[in-house]
Amino acid sequence: MGGKKKPTLSQAEKAQRRREEEARRELRRRLERSEKRILDITPPDIKDEKVLSEIKRMNVITPFSIASRYEVRMSIAKQFLESLHKRGIIELVSKHRNLRIYRAK
């Protein structure tokens, strides 16, 4: 019937440090979420040799890999890959409803 015992001083200090650390982590998470990047709506230049050489070195090319590397939106990356495919620079490996996987020729 005595109820919960009072924690020792070291236990209380550890619990307080954990709470403070968790509060700092939460503050960092909130700040990171608020710094949202604005993505470009212009695709990389198809005629740029640097871009083409980077793409040819990639083993697997997906819209996400292009969008993350060149900081463009996914829709722009999909259009960019489709235009590269039409020009014959890359070839389609697998096609699904949501995802297309390409490979450099």
Image (cartoon, helix red, strand yellow):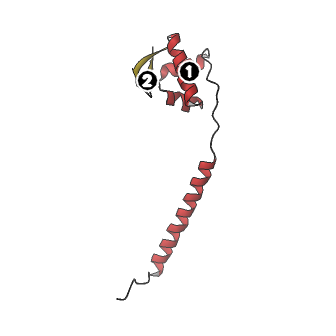
Q: Earlier in the sequence, mark 2 or mark 1?
A: 1
When the figure is inspected, residue 72 is found, relative to residue 103, above or below; the finding is: below
Quadrant position of the C terminus in the picture: top left
Residue 1 horizontal/vertical position (percent) = 34, 88
The residue tagged 2 is: 101
Figure check: 1 above or below 44: below
Q: Which three-letter amino acid code belongs to the residue tagged 1?
A: Phe
- Which numbered tag is attached to residue 17? none
**Residue 45: which quarter of the image?**
top right
* Residue density around tag 2, few if under 14, some if 14–19, many if 20 or more, within 10 Å: some
| Residue at figure coordinates x 61%, y 22% from the top left | 44
In this rendering, is residue 40 above or below 33?
above
101, 69: nearer the viewer: 101
Q: Which residue is mark 1?
A: 80
Q: Quadrant of residue 100?
A: top left
Q: Is residue 16 left or right of residue 3?
A: right
Q: Secondary structure at mark 2?
A: strand
Q: Are marks 2 and 1 in contact (CB under 8 Å)?
A: no
Q: Amino acid at mark 2?
A: Ile
